[in-house]
Amino acid sequence: MLTLLNYLRMYRKRSGLTQDEVGYLLGCANGSKVSRYEQRKRTPTLETALAYEAIFRVPVRDLFAGVFAAIERKTLKRIGRLGGKLSARVETPIIRAKLETLATAIRASRQSQKER
């Protein structure tokens, strides 16, 4: 299944709202930014992404599924590298806690991938 970078247009169309109306809800002068967000020509700020979540009642990670997937892949690679570095150190309670945090992130990612 193809994952789009974002699903803003789909949720806006489903809601029946125009780009100008969503722009108003986001605090914009008109719908031009909304158009750029939908066409992936502009990346919304965190505040704007959370406003989209408040409007459509859809988690940010679902609104921006493709973006989330790319960020998750990159982050999981860094988690693996950091885990390797930490595992090479002398084990202490702090190192164990860090490794457990990293392992939890990996498990959660695998679980959410199974559910998709």
Image: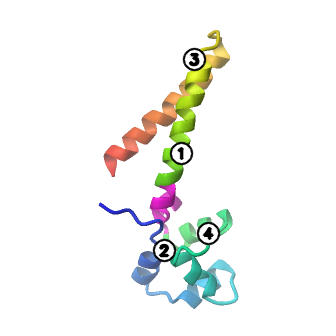
Q: Which numbered disc flags the more N-terminal residue, 2 or 4?
A: 2
Disc 3 or 2, which lies upstream in sequence? 2
Mark 2 / mark 1, whichever is N-terminal: 2
Please rate how many residues cluster around mark 4, counting C-alpha atoms within 10 Å: few if below 14, some from 14 to 19, many from 20: some
Q: Amino acid at mark 2?
A: Leu
Q: Earlier in the sequence, mark 4 or mark 3?
A: 4
Residue 19, position in %: x, y? 54, 87
Task: Report crowding for label 1: few under 14, some 14 to 19, many 20 or more residues within 10 A (C-alpha).
Answer: few
Structural distance between the alpha carbons of marks 3 and 1: 20 Å
Location of mark 1 (residue):
74
Span highlighted in magenta in the image: 57-68
Q: Which mark is residue 87?
A: 3
Residue that mark 4 sits on: 43
Residue type at mark 1: give it: Lys
Residue 63 counted in the magenta span: yes
Q: Nearer the viewer, mark 2 or mark 1?
A: 1
Tag 2 secondary structure: helix
Mark positioned earlier in the residue sequence (3 or 1): 1
Residue 30 position by quadrant = bottom right
The answer to whether 34 is drawn above or below residue 30 in the figure is above
Check disc 3 and give the amino acid type: Ser
* Between marks 1 and 4 in the image, the one whose residue lies nearer the viewer: 1
- Secondary structure of the residue carrying tag 4 is loop
Whole-percent x and y of residue 107?
43, 34
From the image, tell me which residue sits under label 2. 8
